[in-house]
Image (cartoon, rainbow, N blue to C red):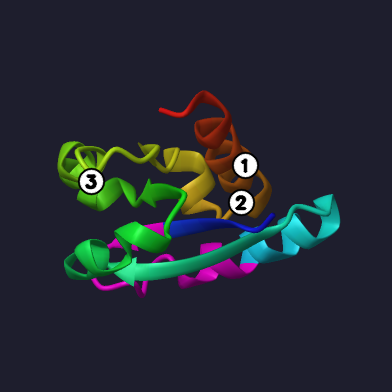
Amino acid sequence: MNRNIVLVCSFGLSTSLLVNSMETAAKEAGAQVRIRAIGSNEVPDVVDETDVFLIAPQVRYLLNGIAAHGLPAGVIEGRAYALADGRAALHQALSLLEQGV
């Protein structure tokens, strides 16, 4: 079953490199996921098709509003974000899914 991971930043641009890295990590791990980046204004439009949200550190203030939709959500760990560490970000997303947080 494919899980939908959505990365949120101001306009969906700064997370695009991380999305590519996460897709590579997912392929290597055999994880069945769909990953994409969106701007913060698009969150309400994708809630119904999202399993977990990862939020860029610079828009961490959005966490409570996004979590209010009842889906797992977390702020991307700073080091993973800065280094575009797809493995770490993928692990974070999958952990949030497992925990249902």
Label for residue 85? 2
- Do labels 2 and 1 touch, CB within 8 Å? yes
- Image coordinates for residue 73, horizontal then vertical, percent: 36, 40
Q: What's the distance in space between the residues labelled 1 and 3, CA to CA?
A: 21 Å
Are the residues tagged 1 and 3 within 8 Å (C-beta)? no
Q: Which of the 4 quarters of the picture holds residue 25? A: bottom right
Q: Residue at x 42, y 41 (%)?
A: 78
Q: Residue at x 56, y 46 (%)?
A: 89
The earlier-in-sequence mark between 1 and 3 is 3
x, y percent for residue 92 = 55, 37
Question: What secondary structure is found at the residue carrying circle 2?
Answer: loop
Residue 71 figure quarter: top left
Is 45 above or below relative to 89?
A: below
Q: Nearer the viewer, residue 34 or 61?
A: 34
Q: In whole angstroms, how far apart are the C-alphas of marks 3 and 2? A: 23 Å
Q: In which quadrant of the rendered image does the C terminus lie? A: top left
Q: Tell whether 91 sits left or right of 64.
A: right
Q: Which mark is residue 66?
A: 3
User: Which one is nearer the viewer's eye here, 46 or 15?
Assistant: 46
What's the residue type where badge 3 is placed?
Ile
For the residues labelled 2 and 1, the Cα–Cα distance comes to 6 Å
Residue with the mark numbered 1: 88
Q: Nearer the viewer, mark 3 or mark 2?
A: 3
In x, y percent, where is residue 82?
47, 52
- Region in magenta: 7-20
